[in-house]
Image (cartoon, grey):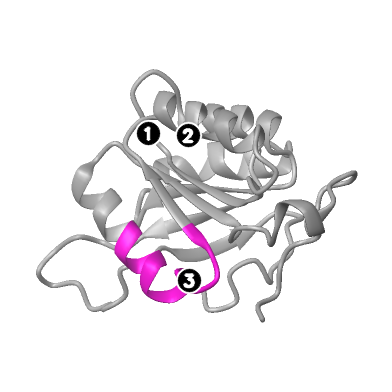
């Protein structure tokens, strides 16, 4: 018997059955990065969470809308690339927050992207995102063997979201 999230108000679980796994959503337009993130998250969390990956902000918003219409659509965290076509990752995470206000919002930035630090820290201080994570460098000389993002900072978010980071 697994641990299930708290049911939404007014839902009778005895009628509709056990809840599905909470969702971890990743949005990244670069296929290689999205695949790497999916593998990394699935290897650690697939037993307890449903991992959903989307290649565009638009498709991710549609999926978030659909999840919001289901009783089992609890989104625990949304990870978004810092740079995307049509909107920034920060803008996307704000839209995701409107749809799922309890989901943690994690902005993914490339390791060593110093130009992103001011906008990211500003977004955290203004409550637009909850935390950021760096993506591992993609090079043959990479010393880290992890394919999961590394959590580098948290705003006021609960640090137990992803305890292995």
Q: What residue appears at the point 30 percent right and 68 percent down from the top-left corner?
A: 147
Task: Name which of mark 2 and mark 1 comes first in the sequence.
Answer: 1
Q: What residue appears at the point 28 percent right and 77 percent down from the top-left corner?
A: 144
Secondary structure at numbered mark 3: helix
The majority secondary structure of the magenta stretch comes to: helix
Query: Magenta segment, which residues?
Result: 38-50
Q: What residue appears at the point 84 percent right and 51 percent down from the top-left corner?
A: 12
The circle drawn on residue 89 is 2
Q: Position of residue 125 (x, y in %)?
A: 72, 42
Secondary structure at numbered mark 1: loop
User: Which of the pair 119/135 is nearer the observer?
Assistant: 135
Q: Position of residue 149 (x, y in %)?
A: 41, 63
The circle drawn on residue 83 is 1
The circle drawn on residue 1 is none
Q: Is residue 37 left or right of residue 92?
A: left
Q: Position of residue 97 (x, y in %)?
A: 67, 35
Task: Name which of mark 3 and mark 1 comes first in the sequence.
Answer: 3
- Answer whether residue 148 is visible to the viewer in this image: no
Q: Is residue 20 left or right of residue 13?
A: left
Residue 44 on the magenta span: yes
Residue identifier under label 3: 45
Contact between marks 2 and 1 (CB within 8 A): the answer is: yes
User: Which of the pair 39/65 is nearer the observer?
Assistant: 65
**Distance in Å between CA atoms under marks 2 and 3:** 23 Å
Using a 10 Å C-alpha cutoff, classify the residue at mark 3 as few (fewer than 14 neighbours), some (14 to 19) or many (20 or more). some
């Amino acid at each position: 018997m697994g641990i299930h999230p708290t049911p939404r108000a007014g839902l009778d679980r005895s009628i509709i059955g056990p809840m599905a796994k909470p969702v971890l959503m990743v949005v990244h337009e670069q296929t290689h990065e999205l695949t790497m993130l999916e593998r990394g998250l699935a290897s650690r969390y697939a037993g307890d969470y449903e991992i959903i990956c989307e290649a565009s902000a638009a498709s991710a918003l549609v999926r978030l809308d659909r999840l919001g219409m289901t009783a089992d659509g609890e989104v625990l965290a949304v990870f978004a690339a810092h740079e995307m076509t049509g909107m920034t990752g920060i803008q996307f995470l704000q839209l995701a927050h409107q749809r799922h206000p309890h989901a943690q919002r994690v902005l993914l930035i490339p390791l060593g992207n110093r130009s992103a630090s001011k906008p990211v820290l500003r977004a955290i201080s203004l409550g637009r995102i909850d935390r950021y994570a760096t993506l591992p460098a993609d090079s043959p000389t990479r010393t880290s063997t992890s394919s999961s993002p590394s959590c580098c900072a948290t705003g006021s978010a609960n640090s137990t979201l992803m305890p292995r980071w």
